[in-house]
Every structure is written in C-alpha cells, then in structure tokens.
C-alpha cells in the first residue's frame, strides 16, 4: 500500500466506519474475511444482532456486474469514433490480481460482445501467467511486494468462477479443485478445461518494465498511468512486438496515478525522488494538466482517525468487538 492509499484509509470519516489494519498480506486478509463469511455460528450471532455481512470487493459478484458495462461502453466508444466497424472483434488487456475485472470482460464476451483475446497481465506475482501457460495453479511460491499492490495476490478468488465455467458448471469438480488449492496450494486442470481457455492469453511485467511503460506512455502521449495500468501497457507492447498484433485493443486502467505518485513520478524522472508525497501530487497535477482529485485533496491535512491493527487470526474477534456481539 502506498503512503497516499494508507492516509486515505486511516482518515476515513463516518460514525459507522471502522478501518482495521491487518498484519500479513492481501491473501491473508481475504482468507480471513472468507472464513468469517462462511462461519455459520458467527452468521447466527450477526442475525440476532440485526447484521449481515456483505463485501464491496469482488468476493461479491455484484462488483463484477458494473465492470461488464466498462467493456460494452468501451466498444461503443470505439464505434462512435469510427475506430472499428460494427461486429469487429477487439482485444482487451487487463491488469489482474484477484481476477475480477478480466472475468467481467469474459462475461461480456460470453454475452456476445465482440472480444477476441482476453489478455491477462500480471506483475512479479505471476501465478496467473503460469496458470494460463501450463494449466497448473500453484500458489506455493514467494510472495513479492511490488509497486502495483492490488495485484500482489497469490490466491485469485475470482478464478474459481472461471474454473466453474470451464468445468462444465460442475460444482463438485470445482469444489474439489479449490479444496486442493486450500490443502496443497496447487491444482491442475485437465486438457478439456485447458481447451476452453483458448481465448485467454497472458503476459507479465517486472518492476523495471512497469516503470519503463509509465515513462513510455508519458513520453509518447503526455498521459500518466498508474503502476497497475502500466503492467497492462507493458504486456500490450510486448504482445504487439512478438505477435505483430494489429487488432484494436482496449487497455483497462484500474487505478489512479495519484495513489501511487512516488512510483509513477520516479518512473518519469528520477529528479522527483527528493519530493514529499504531496509535493509529488502537485507536480503530477502540473505535468498532466489534471486537477488533483477531491478525495486526494481532502486528506492533505486530515486527522488520523483509525489506528487499530490486528493479526489475521484475530480478525473475527476484532469485528465482534466493534459490533458488540
């Protein structure tokens, strides 16, 4: 998490808002959340107290529904600008960690949107890159902290939904594979399932290539991308070079550069290294000609309102304490 992201979190306002820092990584936190969601005893406690759990991230399939619209809208804009002809297929490149956004593109394609290739872009935590190239999902590897933290994931929750589809919607087979992931950290899909993944291709960008993509896009287009979008851009550039790809391609931009100013600005020019975080915010605004987002502006002098930190094993205890269960 970047300093700007952290300050956004710890300054969140609202009498019914509680922000809890979790020791560990994204996978640890998400696993802990899922365990609480599946805890029937806790569900009964919540019900008696008048509460029910929900999720704002892609654990909840409701998050994916508006993301489907992104791709329909993008296709419509390409038509409107005469970049493509009606019915012409496009490719999409999506920076991917938890597999939600690219799964939405898959759903859009399944609904009939003319998408050819679904290009899955990974950072150094390239568990998905390896999966699409081998058919083996193996989370038994080093967890790497990168400049694109939303992609620092080894357990891509939404991939389970794709596995369900390519398993012929066989819930038992899907459950067996997910049990293997939980107990052994690895599973292998069969050849029939692999064949159903032929519309997916994958690539990855390390930290050097991610930074280079930020600079390349800025130098060529005077446009500043965040670190996650840069991973996708890097994978796209690699593809057009190696595959001589000329199909119109949509690169999904999934975050704001204002949240990752230090990595973004240092990639553009090392002269920015000595600036403070908010000096970088102002400089980014100046060179991009884009106003500082209100949400970022508001946290400059905001008070720290949340400082609770707990171990992943104490997540449920902490939630029960907050809710007075």
Image (cartoon, helix red, strand yellow):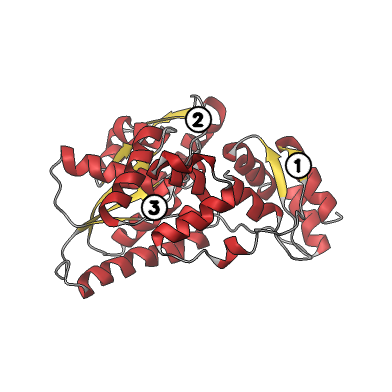
- Name which residue lies at 27% across and 71% down: 77
- The answer to which of marks 1 and 3 sits earlier in the sequence is 3
Residue 308 coordinates in the image, percent (x, y)? 78, 46
Residue depicted at x 58% and y 40%? 26
Query: Where residue 100 appears, x then y in whole percent?
Result: 45, 52
Give the labeled residue for mark 2.
144
Quarter of the image containing the N terminus?
top right
What residue sits right under mark 3 in the picture?
225
Circle 2 Cα neighbour tier, 10 Å, few/some/many (<14 / 14–19 / ≥20): some
The secondary element bearing badge 1 is classed as strand
Which badge, 2 or 3, is on the more N-terminal residue? 2
Residue, x 70% and y 44% (percent of image)?
Answer: 21
Residue 248, located in which quarter of the rendered image? Answer: bottom left
Percent across and percent down for residue 276 are 58, 46
Please state the horizontal and vertical placement of residue 131, each as a whole percent of the image.
36, 34
Pointer 1: what residue? 309
SS state under label 2: loop
């Amino acid at each position: 998490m970047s300093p700007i992201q952290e300050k956004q979190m710890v300054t969140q306002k609202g009498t019914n808002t509680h922000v809890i820092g979790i020791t560990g990584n994204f996978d640890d936190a998400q696993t802990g959340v899922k365990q609480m969601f599946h805890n029937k005893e806790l569900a009964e406690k919540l019900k008696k107290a008048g509460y029910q759990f929900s999720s704002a991230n892609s654990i909840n399939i409701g998050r994916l529904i508006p993301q489907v619209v992104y791709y329909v809208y993008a296709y419509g804009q390409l038509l409107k600008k005469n970049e493509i002809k009606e019915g012409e297929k496009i490719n999409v490149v999506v920076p991917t960690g938890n597999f939600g956004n690219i799964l939405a593109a898959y759903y859009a394609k399944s609904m009939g949107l003319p998408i050819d290739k679904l290009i899955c872009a990974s950072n150094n935590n390239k568990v998905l890159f390896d999966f699409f190239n081998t058919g083996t999902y193996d989370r038994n590897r080093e967890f790497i902290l990168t400049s694109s933290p939303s992609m620092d994931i080894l357990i891509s929750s939404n991939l389970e939904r794709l596995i369900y589809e390519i398993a012929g919607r066989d819930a038992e087979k899907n459950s067996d594979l997910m049990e293997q992931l939980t107990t052994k950290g690895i599973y292998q899909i069969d050849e029939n399932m692999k064949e159903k993944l032929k519309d997916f291709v994958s690539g990855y960008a390390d930290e050097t290539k991610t930074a280079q993509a930020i600079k390349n896009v800025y130098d060529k287009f005077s446009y500043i991308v965040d670190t996650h979008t840069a991973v996708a851009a890097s994978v796209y550039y690699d593809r057009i070079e190696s595959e001589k790809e000329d199909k119109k391609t949509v690169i999904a931009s999934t975050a704001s550069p204002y949240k990752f100013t230090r990595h973004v600005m240092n990639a553009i020019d090392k002269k920015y290294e000595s600036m403070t975080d908010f000096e970088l915010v102002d400089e980014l605004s100046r060179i991009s000609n884009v106003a500082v987002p209100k949400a970022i502006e508001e946290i400059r002098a905001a008070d720290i309102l949340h400082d609770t930190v707990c171990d992943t094993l104490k997540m449920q205890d902490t939630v029960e304490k907050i809710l007075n269960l």
